[in-house]
Amino acid sequence: MAPSRAGRRADSGFDALRFEHVALPEIDLDAIDLTATLFGRRLSAPLLISSMTGGPERAARINRHLAEAAQTLGIALAVGSQRIALEGRGDGGLDRSLRALAPDVPLLANIGAAQLGLGYGLDEARRAVEMIDADALIVHLNPLQEAVQPGGDRNWRGILSGIESLVLDLGRPVVVKEVGAGISGPVARRLADVGVAVIDVAGAGGTSWAAIEAERLADPRARATALLFADWGIPTAQAIPAVRAACPAITLIGSGGIRNGLDAAKAIRLGADLVGQAAASLAAAEVSTEAAARHFAGVVEELRIACFCTGSADLAALRRAAIAGIPEPGAA
């Protein structure tokens, strides 16, 4: 009898990739250029602190630490869902004080795509952006989570047109991201065609919201159903090249199971412009600004070493570095 797949977690796919070592890099490690840009703001490294919270009671502290760390290191910050704040049930530190803590880096607001089918529209989107003086708005996609969640939002008809309306009228760039099951090339193309500026693949291999929802369920049958989908999704290392092939010109963020700077380097090599990390940094974000900054500084250093040992003087060179492990996009 075949073993049950229920509860098994997905693999991001990064461990199957291996850079070719360059024993004569002929570059200065400390002079490697990791700078990037997002929404017209310069980043010291191509990193985004991805959307997260630690629960309402901890969110304000976490958001403060992350904002200060982002400003210190010159990297971007995306906040978690602002639904609770928009509904007046506590802001979790999501107010203009966040921009005051991080005046020079990109800040991304966040609402759920499912809410676009439940009456959310331009007013709520503008409030989310204005709440933190954000540079852009993330619309996050979480159909699997909603499907296994009791009382989840199951009617997703018209979501794409809702996203298109925001693109046309919001006056800020719109980013679309998954929450851990990945975005395929065809879906990315549909999003790009309605004017979405940035896609964050947020692939399988990181947080499994089906598994998280399973832990919350008391009903054994519902729990078993959620666990069945714990490894559902497109691995991040597959989603990135697929979306890049479908949307060559779009700004692409690779997230989902990014554990360290070497994973970040692999994501950039596969086609990501920036790399997002969330769960791996949550413990540090709860402790202090300094702990959060140390964590992300470590990721940057690991990325720099990967560049050095592939002979890559900048991110453009890293995207051409020799790598083995999976076929290139379009390969048979």
Image (spheres, rainbow, N blue to C red):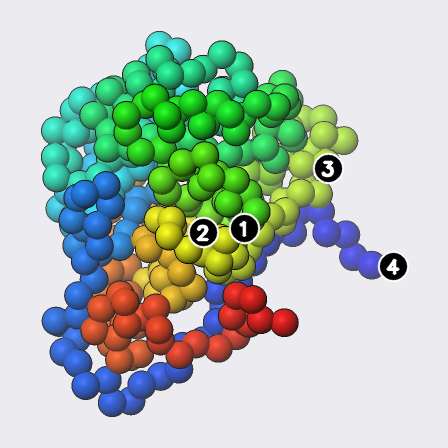
Counting residues from the N terminus, which is met first, the one under dot 2 or under dot 4?
4
Quadrant, the N terminus? bottom right
- Circle nearer the viewer, 2 or 1: 2
Which residue is denoted by mark 1 in the rendering?
185
Look at the numbered disc 3 and give the secondary structure of its residue: helix
How far apart marks 2 and 1 lie (CA) works out to: 8 Å
Amino acid at pointer 1: Gly
Which residue is denoted by mark 2 in the rendering?
247
**Residue drawn 16% across and 49% down?**
42
Q: Position of residue 188 (x, y in %)?
A: 50, 45
Quadrant, the C terminus? bottom right
Which residue is denoted by mark 4 in the rendering?
1
Mark 1 touches mark 3? (CB < 8 Å): no
Counting residues from the N terminus, which is met first, the one under dot 3 or under dot 4?
4
- Circle nearer the viewer, 1 or 4: 1
Which residue is denoted by mark 3 in the rendering?
224
